[in-house]
Amino acid sequence: MPPAPGNPAPDFTLPDTHGTPVHLADLRGGPVLLVFYPFAFSGICTGELCELRDNLEDFEAAGFTLLGISCDSVFTQKAWA
């Protein structure tokens, strides 16, 4: 069941593009924007993620941490990054 609006997301641990575990609990204390996308090499996802990348400084200046989450493998994500 998804969390209600305004409630924190449940904790999870997923690998980053280098295979290093990222724990959501380690990022508590500030806003975290979770961006879910299905496939790294699709045109729409690439465009949306490039838009986020191009505006990353604005998100960081506002105190946000951005986490992109995909069903692709670590190897695919690393090649795409």
Image: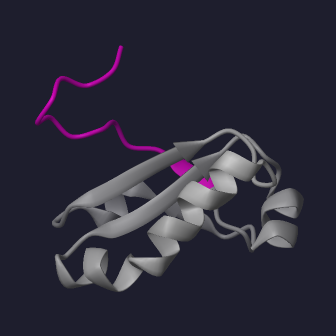
Residue at 58% x, 69% y is 50
Q: Position of residue 14 (x, y in %)?
A: 60, 52
- In the rendered view, tell whether residue 66 sits above or below residue 39: below
| Quadrant in the picture for the C terminus | bottom right
Specify the farthest residue to the top.
Answer: 1
- In the rendered view, tell whether residue 17 sits above or below residue 61: above
| Quadrant in the picture for the N terminus | top left
Please state if 62 lies on the left or on the right of 1 as rendered: left
| Secondary structure that dominates the magenta span | loop
Q: Is residue 10 magenta?
A: yes
- The part of the image, by quadrant, that contains residue 55 is bottom left
Residue in front for this viewpoint, 45 or 4: 45
Q: Is residue 18 magenta?
A: no
> How is colour applied across the structure in the image?
one colour
Residue in front for this viewpoint, 56 or 68: 56
* Residue bounds of the magenta highlight: 1-14
Residue at 15% x, 29% y is 5
Please state if 72 lies on the left or on the right of 28 as rendered: right
Q: Position of residue 24 (x, y in %)?
A: 39, 55
